[in-house]
Image (cartoon, helix red, strand yellow):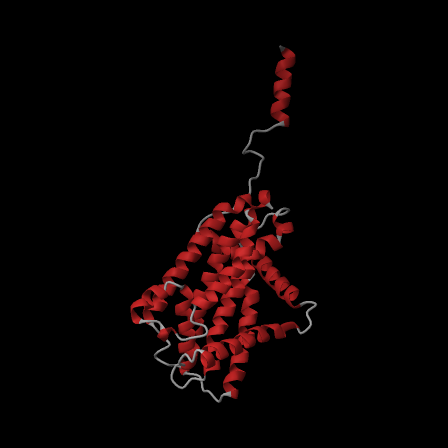
Amino acid sequence: MFQDKVKNKVRKVLKPSLGEFDLIIEPNKTTSDFIYELLKYRELFYFLAWRDILVRYKQTVIGIAWSVIRPLLSMIIFTVIFGRVAKLPTEGTVPYPIMVFSALIPWQYFANAMQASSDSLIRASHMVSKIYFPRIILPTSAVLVSAVDFMISLAMLVILMIIYRFLPSPYIVLLPIFFIPATITALGIGYWFSAIGVKYRDFTHIMPFIIQFGLYVSPVGFSSSVIPERWRMLYSLNPMVGVIDGFRWCIQGTSASLYPPAFIISIIMSSLVFYSGMRFFRKTEKSFADFI
């Protein structure tokens, strides 16, 4: 009896109760905590973004020129197919290449940001499985790489306008307004696919198909004004329709470019995609290390 009492006391000393000495680290779930964690871990956020930028252009033949070649080739193809072969109308007196390129800029940014954000967890699996940090930093920081390409494409657009002697509209100062819904839509979809892709790796193969399909259903190679009026609201459920139309309006200044209901719908849809993606990501975040 005495020995049993001694053993019980030893067990209590060697094995303290849960909650007194155990530290449990788990992600917070609310939107305010999401913003707080990004600010708290901002050094890691900047480091990961800068690392992705360096890795992207390291050991490439022509380096950063890829950011110019891809939209330039796409502009030539769309101009030939839609402008010369299909003979779709341009907007006012705007040269067709400028109309196409002003739409390619936000689309390329959106597509690249969505792709990079979706693949971020798989590419950083060695970090996710070994140390704790807010996992949502990975898909969020990946968007900054696409922002660099976006700035390079804007510089290319300026050169194109000089070649065609086209003067942009004064509304060009409003471009950042339309940049926001493109960013949060790409992040929302990136959160969804990065979280699902951890458990089901074949989801990473779906993203290129979605990007290719979205390119043809978005008003990149043509103007939204060619869509019949009775279908404009339904067509605007694609959040990139309002973004692309807004970019064209800021650069070209033509009234046919801007369809206000489309932009309002884009804001609503992009907000829903972002919020639902963030909530799903935070809900499944605790199981990432197990599946990776």
Corner quadrant of residue 178: bottom left
Corner quadrant of residue 63: bottom right
Q: Is residue 71 above or below residue 142?
A: below
Q: Residue at x 41, y 79 (%)?
A: 88
Figure label count: 0
Q: Is residue 183 above or below residue 158?
A: above
Measuring from the top left, give residue 186's x and y in whole percent.
48, 61
Residue 32 visible? The answer is no
**Residue lying farthest to the left in this orientation:** 230
**Residue lying farthest to the bottom in this orientation:** 165
Q: Residue at x 56, y 76 (%)?
A: 73
- State left or right for residue 245 relative to residue 120: left
Q: Which image quadrant: the N terminus? A: top right
Of residues 34 and 97, the one nearer the viewer is: 97
Measuring from the top left, give residue 68's x and y in whole percent.
58, 75
Measuring from the top left, give residue 64's x and y in whole percent.
63, 73
Corner quadrant of residue 94: bottom left
**Residue lying farthest to the front in this orientation:** 85
Measuring from the top left, give residue 25's x and y in whole percent.
55, 43
Of residues 209 and 140, the one nearer the viewer is: 209
- State left or right for residue 91 relative to residue 149: left
Of residues 38 and 214, the one nearer the viewer is: 214
Q: Is residue 282 above or below residue 45?
A: above
Of residues 193 and 151, the one nearer the viewer is: 193
Residue 190 visible? The answer is yes
